[in-house]
Amino acid sequence: MPKTTLVSLAASLGVSRQTVSNVINAPHRVKPETRMRVQHAIAESGYRPSAAARQLRTRRSMNLGIRLMPVVDGINGSILDRFLHALTESAQDEGYRLTLFCAESDSGEIRQYEELLKVADLDGFVLTGTHYGDARTEWLLEHEVPFAAFGRPWSSVEDPFGSGHPWVDVDGGAGTEQAARTLIEQGHTAVGFIGWPAGSGAGDDRRAGWKRAMVAAGLATDTLDIQADDGVPAGAQGAERLASRGATALVCASDSLALGAAAKMRQLFPEQASGTVIGFDDTPVAAAVGLSSVSQPIEDAARHIIAVLAHELAGTNFPGGEEVPERHLLLPPTLIQRTPYSFSSS
Amino acid sequence: MPKTTLVSLAASLGVSRQTVSNVINAPHRVKPETRMRVQHAIAESGYRPSAAARQLRTRRSMNLGIRLMPVVDGINGSILDRFLHALTESAQDEGYRLTLFCAESDSGEIRQYEELLKVADLDGFVLTGTHYGDARTEWLLEHEVPFAAFGRPWSSVEDPFGSGHPWVDVDGGAGTEQAARTLIEQGHTAVGFIGWPAGSGAGDDRRAGWKRAMVAAGLATDTLDIQADDGVPAGAQGAERLASRGATALVCASDSLALGAAAKMRQLFPEQASGTVIGFDDTPVAAAVGLSSVSQPIEDAARHIIAVLAHELAGTNFPGGEEVPERHLLLPPTLIQRTPYSFSSS
DNA sequence: TTACAGAATATGAACGTTCAAATAGGGTTG
DNA sequence: CAACCCTATTTGAACGTTCATATTCTGTAA
C-alpha cells in the first residue's frame, strides 16, 4: 500500500493539502466541522507528517543535541543514566528528539555544533559540565544557537542569574552546608572536608558550603580542609590525614572520595555506630554500601532544562503562553541519610 | 551571507548541481580534473549537504535509534555509559547519528518504532536486553526493519547462530566458568553460585558456566546454587546461606550480588586475605572496592554492532565490499582479578 | 439585487537533494 | 563519413511539507 501523505489524505477527503496541514498546525483556522472530519481521517489512516519534509521547509528538525562526555569516573558518572533518561523522556513529551554525539574536547564539541547545525538542523543543545571560561557557551551565544546548560555559568560567577543563557543547576554548596550542619548537630566539632583542588566551579562551591556551616557554628576550618583529586584511595588518604588532625566526621565532594574515606573512618573508629562520612551525588554505590550522600534532583533538573529550551524555541510563536519557565534555576539538593549497610543475619 | 547549497556551489563553479552531487556520492563518475576542482570548492566553502533534503529524497536519515531502558539498578546499569559512548562514537565514524527514545515496555518500544520509522525515517535500531520470546525482534523482522541486538536471541536458543538477525553478545557462561575455575585452582572445593531466578537467558547462561567448571573438576553443585533477585542485601543473604553449607568462595551473576556477598564473606572469614567472591560486569563499584569481576568487552560489542548494522544498511550498494562483519558474534569476557581494597596507611 | 467583508479553503512556489533520462563530447569502427 | 559507443555532463521531475497569496463561500447591509 502506498504511504499516506498530506496530499493523498487530502485527496481522499476531497479537501486541499493545506487544509489538512492547518488542522495539524493551526486548528483554529479551519471550520470545526471539517476539522473533525480531517482529524478522524488522520487517526484512521495513522498518518504522521514527515519530519524530513517539515525540516526542509521550516529549517527546524525538532531535534536537540547532547554530547556524551568521555567516561572518566564510572562512579560519579553513573548518574548520567538518570539524567539522560529524564532528558529524553521530557523531550519526547514536548515533541523533541534527542541526538547524541561525542567529542574529545570543548573545541571538538564546537566543531560538532557547526556540523550538526549545518547538516541536521538541530534546534538546540543541552550542555553539561560547564566550567570557568567555557568556550562553548561563548560560541553558542555568539552564533545565536539556542541552548540550556546543566551547570551555572561559572565565568560570570558574580551574578550567574544575569547570564545571557538559560541554565539549571543544583546548589551544591547548600548540600555540603546541610551535610556539615547535620554532623555538627550530631555533636561533632571537627568536621573535615575532602574536596577537589581549587579551580573547579562546582568543587569550590561545595567547599564553600561546608565552610559556611562551620563558620556559622563558630568552628575552626583551617586544618580541616583537604584538596585531593577524585578517587577512592585519595578519599582514604584524606580521611587518615584529617583524622590525625582531630576530625571525627567528614564531608566529601564526591561519593568516590567518600567511599574511601568511610572505609578508613570505619577502620579508625570501629566503635562508631552511625555513619560519620557524607558523600556527594548519591550514586548507586552510596546506596549499595549505605553511605549518606547529598542527592541531586537530577530528574527535575533535566525536566526543567527541556522546559526552558522548548519554551525558548517556541517562544516567538506563543508570546502570551501559559507560565514561563525560569531561565535560571538553582535547585536544592537533598541529604540522604543512611546507616552503613550492616551485613547481619536476616 | 546566504547558505551554500548544491545549486549555489555549482553555479559558482560553472557546473551543474548533479556534477557536484556526484562528486559527493559517486566520485568515480566524474572526471578527475573536475572532481578535484569541485572537492576543493567544497572544502573552501565548508559546504555540507542538508540531511533533510537527502532524507526526503532517499528515505534514509542516517539515524539509528536506541531505547534507553528504565533505570532499574544503578550499579549494573552504569556500564550503559560505556556502551552508549562507544556506540555513538562508532556510529559517528560511519556517518550515522544516534537518536534516543524511551519506552515503558516492549510493546511501547514497538509503538515507538512505528512512530520513528514514519516520522523520522530511522534507518535501523540497536536492541538491548533481549529475552525469551522477545516480541520486538519478531516485529522488526516481520516489518523488515534493519537492526542489530546486543544479546543473543534467546528464543531460538538451540541455535542462536542460525538467527535471522544480527546480534553481538558476550559469552557470560565462559566468564563464570573461568571465574569458578580460577577459584577451584586456588584450592577451593566448594564454590557457590548466587544468580537470578531461572528464566532469564543471561542468568541461566551464567549459572551454566559456573556449573560446567564445577562438574569438570568433579565437584558437587546441588547445594551450592542459590537463586535470588538482584541486589546487595540479597547477595549478603545468599552468601550467608552458602557459607553455612560449606562454601568458601562464590561466583555471582552481578556486582550487586557480589558486593553484598563479599562484605558478608569478609565478615564471616576475616582472616581470609584474598578475595573469594567474583562478581559480574566489572562495574565502577567493583573497581572502587577491589572486587574481582567478569568484565564484558562492551566497547568492542558496541563497535561491532554498529559495524554489522552499517554493513547491513549499505550492503546492497557494496556487494563486493571489503571484509564482511560477522552477523553473529559471541565475544569472550575477561576476568579482572583484584584484591580487596585495603585502606592501610600510605 | 448588489456590494462588501470576513471566514474558509485552495493554489503556486519553494526548501535542497537525488533519480531517471537526455544531451553533448570524443573516439572507434565499418 | 556515417554509424556507433562510451564517457562526462546536464536537465526535468519528484520527495512531502509550509509559506504567501489567491480564490470561493456565506452572510449582512445598503
Image (tube, coloured by chain):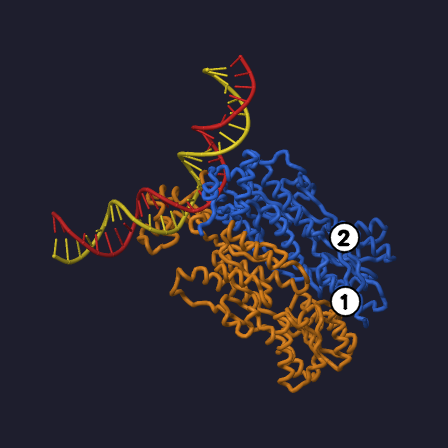
Chain colours: A orange, B blue, C red, D yellow
User: Which residue is pictured at 60% across the width and 59% down the height?
Assistant: A106
| Outermost residue to the right | B187
How far across and how far down the image is residue B144, in percent?
Answer: 56, 40
Give the quadrant of the C terminus of chain B: bottom right
Few, some or many C-alpha atoms within 10 Å of disc 2 (few <14, some 14-19, many ≥20)? many
User: Which residue is pictured at 38% across the width and 65% down the height?
Assistant: A320
Secondary structure found at label 1: helix
Q: Earlier in the sequence, mark 1 or mark 2?
A: 1
How far across and how far down the image is residue B294, in percent?
Answer: 75, 55
**Residue A7 or residue A57, whichever sits in front:** A57
Cα distance, mark 1 to mark 2? 23 Å
| Of labels 1 and 2, the one closer to you | 2
Mark 2 lies on residue: B334
Amino acid, disc 2: Thr
Secondary structure found at label 2: strand
How far across and how far down the image is residue A7, in percent?
Answer: 38, 43
Mark 1 lies on residue: B263
Q: From the viewer's perspective, is residue A17 above or below residue C5?
A: above
How far across and how far down the image is residue A331, in percent?
Answer: 55, 71
Checking the image for residue B324, the label placed there is none
Q: Is residue C13 left or right of residue A77?
A: left
